[in-house]
Image (cartoon, coloured by chain):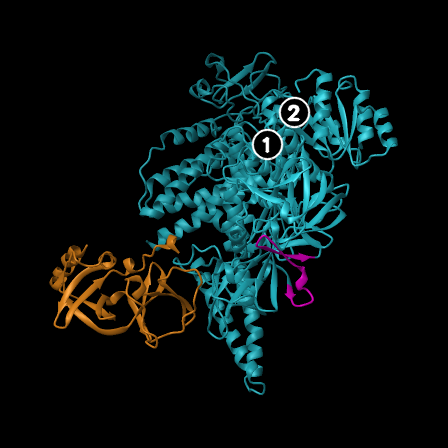
Chain colours: A cyan, B orange
Amino acid sequence: MDDLLRDFLTESAENLQKLDQDLIELEQRPHDLALVHSIFRTIHTIKGTCGFIGLPRLEVLAHVTESVLGAVREGRLMVVPSMISDILQSVDTIKAIQGELERSETEPAGDDTALLGSLQAWMDCATTPVSNSPMAPTPAAVRAIMASNAQAQAICASTPTEVSPPVFTPEPDELELVGGARGTFEDFSTGEVLAIHADAGMVARSTGESRAVLGTPLSAPADAGISPDGTDAAPTLPPVQAVTAAPTVATPPNAPEAPRTESASGEARGSIADSSLRVNVTLLDKLMNLVGELVLARNQLIQLSAADDDSVYAAPVQHLNRVTTDLQEAVMRTRMQAIGGAWSKLPRLVRDLAKASGKQLALEMHGAETELDRQILQAIQDPLTHMVRNSADHGVELPDVRRSAGKPEQGTIRLNAYHEGGHVILEIADDGAGISVEKVRRKAVERGLVPADVAATLSEAQVFRFIFEPGFSTAEKITNVSGRGVGMDVVRSNIEKIGGTVELSSREGRGTTVRVKIPLTLAIISALLVGSASEVFAIPQIGVVELVRVNDEVRHRIEEVQGARFFRLRDTLLPLVSLAERLVLSTTSLPDEYNIIVCQVGELRVGLVVDEVFDTQEIVVKPVGRLVKHLPVYAGCTILGDGRVIMILDTTGIANEALAVTHAEQAAGAATELDASEDGATESVLVYDAGSTALQAVPLSLVARLEEIPADQIEEADGRALVQYRGALLPLLPASAAMDLRARNPRPVIVFTDNGRSMGVAVDEIRDIVDARLTLDQATHRPGVLGVCVIGGRATEIIDTNHFLRQAFGDWFAPAAQLQRGDTHVLLVDDSRFFLSLIAPVLRGAGYKVSTASDGRDALTYLERGDRYDIIISDIDMPAVDGFALAREIRANPAWSDVPLLALTGRSTPADRERARACGFDEFLVKFDREAVLSALQRLAATAGVPA
Amino acid sequence: MSAAIGATTSGHGSVEYVTFRLADQWLGIPVLLVQEVLLAQRIALVPRTPAEVAGFLNLRGQIVTAVELRTRLGLPARAAGEAPMNVVVRHEGELFSLLVDEVGDVLSVDGAAVEPPPPTLDPTWRQACAGIVRRERGLLVVVHVHALLRLDLAAA
């Protein structure tokens, strides 16, 4: 490409981008002359160069645009939003033409007639110098007019809605010629005479939309009564004498003046220009690469000289080391750009979105000077745009909706960027409608991302994470503005690809905030070198939280549950992933001592098991090439000081693959911390050895009896094991698949009963009965297992007895078929998440519709908002509002006072029963006798007259 | 495809090929594609890459992806103790090293002498083959570098 053309395109590109911003600012501050001058100069330069290079289409566009701006600059036109829109359109067209120029080096053909027409119309609106008028104004008068224009505009600007200055759309026959003015208009309602500088043709054209400026009062209007559409003549503008605002020094918009203005501005800009210069990006990248090589060579030298203590090279190598470090830092800084660069297109975007949707949007940007690596900046550009679009499209409400919600009509989208640790935090917040947690929760269940009962127990933060699942959209309709296909899942994956995280929080009715955390740089990173099966790998330091060495002292904290290994790290159960397994490295079993690298993967922590940990080094990240790029386990490769090539691991990729964890499961299982405060009561559990390596447990309340069955009484029929027991046949199920029932004599059996039928689970040994706080730590989704938790310091599986019952009696829950429960809606109130997930399925299995609340206060909230229930079952001991208080509240309210109330509690003293009765409970049951609960429900439903 | 090669080169006289041997077959690629030829290098194994990818090597600070041509073209592995040679090519902005048994001379081949590959050729070879040249001591199989580097990544 021609050098001249290339330079022109490069320089214009920068200027045009600034133009967008400047024009929007001008719209907000229409009397800012400095802005007008700057904008004018830019267009003027483009126009000049076009003519010189020979780009006719561009030249015409630039020329007409420049004329409009020239008129504004001279005070002959005032700035209004519709004018800005037209100029912006012109800028867009210029950009498009330049884009094509870049591609094909020829100006694209195109019809700009409509645009040129609009721009010309503004020109026609402008006052023209009327040199022969006896009323030609003195410079002083001109200044006064410009000042009063400014004031009038200021008044207009102070009214909240988009306003243009007073506009009169007189009928053509109302035009009179007075003096040298092209026309005056007598406002018959107020008696004022104002001058209009418009062609009759122009007037006839202006329909509804206000055109600029023409009320040109010589002094400021007495008060505002300015109406947006100019239809009423309220403005009390004093009579006008002179008309034109054109200075007689009409400057021809041609070259002769240009150099003067250019140099004037050039001088003003001189100091800024001196302190920065334009450098080709490819050159900078090359510089970066070379510094990278230097870093590697430096590493090599350090290694060599370290090997030789007395070497004469030691001192020079140290010097080289210091210099290289400084050079590296300096070059890294050349890659650092202010995040404001990524924000530059946003004001225009927000303006366009506002116009398109009829909403009022303001964009606030804080921390634009926060710097980050160019590569990262590029990577977040699209996600950022998408999130701002989301706020504008789905977040901020229409003005009248906001008004009726008591909010200011204008919605604000707020960007905030700052450094924190080794990261940059970027927040995108809006004060819009927010997102309904319940809607997301329901949608997640509908999409099958999480089972309903687990969903009910998730915290807000966990629920909001579903928004980042592919295909998840709570918007009522997908508009063109946000677009399809660029979902929040793409946002998250783009951000995670550069090693960042993103999370969303929201308050329904108040607004939404998205918080993005990204690393400062990608090119040279600090990495931990580790070894596994005699291979060396690098792990970026940024994802490493801590290191644990596993030796004899600590070994007991490794737990194995059905093949999955965990490490008990303080209060957390850390899932373990073996690097050797993930990379299919040939290896014998684990060495005696090894290491666990605790890595942060999104919101989860994972332990990566490696044989050895070496040291931390600064390494240069090199891309892997297309034959390896598709492997999620690698983030790149690097060359060590000794010339070896080693792979850089992507811990996120490894963890995601290994755990095959969907984010839904992460959300559900994120309660890896034993949060005792979440679950209220402790449960009595029966702990037994099931014959595998893990212990199992069942809540004692579910157990009917413990028996010891002599081995010779165990019979087999039909492939099933049975024993004669109390006059009936008791099916026996082994607690673990590989159990030989007769191997122990007598065989311990745990007996469960339901509906008159019993079954027994054969175990190896009944260990203990303990009071434990049950928290579901890891949702394993294995049938028959409710979860894993730590009881008495050991990982223990909590067994879902329903599973065993179903196994023994396929139709255990069939009774529901005989009973048409219909829509009997039961509200289950209990602060134990565990218990809710235990009881709710039982009730649902019996045909009831079940809702849950985790506290009396929540139950009251639901009732208050209008939810209706046929029966309410409640625990007594709950933190905020306990069962007694709940019952009293319910009975006190005439709307609900006759709802059957059933207390289901661990308390069992007569005093408790009495108190429960007194507070209003109809029945009182102790946890957890399934039969009793179901029959009580039947009774209560019958008395209340609902289907049961 | 091979006809096209014949067509383009016949008008221009001869093309020069770097020749190399795999087992007892000689192959050739245009000399202009070859950056350099090296003796055996230290190759870093990269776990979980396709079988044809032998690993990475460090060429003066650049990462080069080594592709074992024996595997790529369905030949049995080299005998233990036999070291490969490296034919380093640049393809789509990246460096690759084709691992071969032995590198031969640079041959000047007249365009007209390049014949289309016989239909009896093994399919794996055929999709990489640009043409066949008859020589005194056997055939020279001219191959496409881009085809050699086209691996089935999904199978990895």
Tell me if residue A629 comes above or below residue A708 in the rendering: below
Query: Which mark, residue A442?
Result: 1
- Magenta part of the chain: A548-569
What type is the residue that disc 2 sits on? Arg
- Report if residue B15 is visible in the image: yes
Element assignment for label 1: helix
Q: Residue A38: tell me if it is visible.
A: no
Residue A554 part of the magenta segment: yes
Question: In the image, what residue type sits under mark 1?
Answer: Arg
Residue A403 shows which numbered tag? 2
The crowd level at tag 1 (other Cα within 10 Å; few <14, some 14-19, many 20+) is some
Residue A470 in the image, given as x and y percentages of width and height: 50, 40
The answer to whether residue A401 is above or below residue A277 is: above
- In the picture as drawn, the residue positioned furthest to the front comes out as A712
User: x, y percentage for residue A704?
Assistant: 72, 38
Quadrant in which residue A213 is drawn: top right
Tell whether A21 sits left or right of A681.
left
Tag 1 or tag 2, which sits nearer the N-term? 2
Q: What residue is drawn where x is 45% and y is 63%?
A: B47
